[in-house]
Image (spheres, helix red, strand yellow):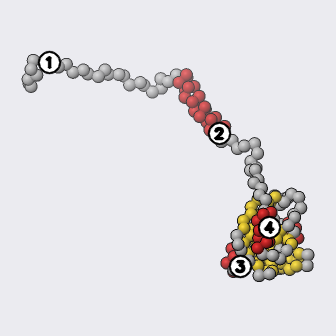
Amino acid sequence: MPDNGGVTQQLEQPAVRGKKKRGRESAGDMVRSLSLVLIIVLGVFFLAQPPDSDEKELRQVDPTADIASFAQTHPGLPVPRALPSGWRSTVTDVTADLLRVGWVTPKNEYAEYAASTSPTEEFLREITDAAPEVAPVDISGVQWKQYRAGTAISLVRNTGGATIVIGTRRASASLDELRVLAGSLAG
């Protein structure tokens, strides 16, 4: 036996608890558990509800300054002018050699105007999504090449050293709506 210097140690032994037997839960225990789960489910349900109107607010822009700037830099080039009411411009982008303007039509479709003063085959392939050319379209006595890829229609015309595209690969507007846009062009 080891010498403790006359001190005796008494070791505490942990109290032995009996293991709770399964099947002894009360109805109150089950109600409390189910209530907690129900609160969590209802919280997730209410937080995941969509807004009353799933329609997003349409951001409108005024393309007048970009159109005027491009027309001033490239006089005589046909650019969009006054469109009928209901056409809402949503995007405009202008650089030294490119103007792009997009509208939501009265039928909630998308129509776009793009003009490039330094067009390349790559520009045309990209903007029409490499769509095949189909029968040309006559709009007010002017012939437009027509490209179709699925429902997207692109009308293309070369004039004054520039390529003008109405529709583009992102457009969902009908041919009649694109005719309205083409009819608004003036140089």
The CA span between labels 4 and 3 is 19 Å
Q: SS for tag 1? A: loop
Mark 3 or mark 4, which is nearer the start of the sequence? 4
- Identify which amino acid the numbered label 4 is placed on: Ala
Q: Which mark is residue 118?
A: 3
Callout 2 touching callout 1 (CB < 8 Å):
no
Q: Is residue 39 left or right of residue 16?
A: right
Q: Residues within 10 Å of mark 3 (few under 14, many from 20)?
A: few
- Tell me the quadrant of the picture where the N terminus can be found: top left
Task: Report whether 187 appears left or right of 37.
Answer: right
Which residue was labeled with disc 1?
8
Q: Nearer the viewer, mark 2 or mark 1?
A: 2
Residue 144 placed where, x, y %? 83, 78
Mark 2 or mark 1: name the one nearer the start of the chain. Answer: 1
Structural crowding at the residue carrying mark 4, measured as other residues with C-alpha within 10 Å and reported as few (<14), some (14–19) or many (≥20): some
Q: Amino acid at mark 2?
A: Leu
Query: Which label is found at residue 47?
Result: 2
Query: Visible in this render: residue 46?
Result: yes
Q: CA distance from mark 1 to mark 3?
A: 101 Å
How far apart are the two marked residues, 2 and 1, measured between alpha carbons? Answer: 65 Å
* Label 1 crowd (10 A; few <14 / some 14-19 / many >=20): few
Q: Amino acid at mark 1?
A: Thr
Question: What's the residue at 24%, 20% (across, down)?
Answer: 12
Q: Earlier in the sequence, mark 1 or mark 4?
A: 1
Relative vertical location of residue 131 with respect to residue 62 in this rendering, above or below = below
User: Residue beneath label 4, please?
Assistant: 68
Q: Quadrant of residue 121 in the image?
A: bottom right
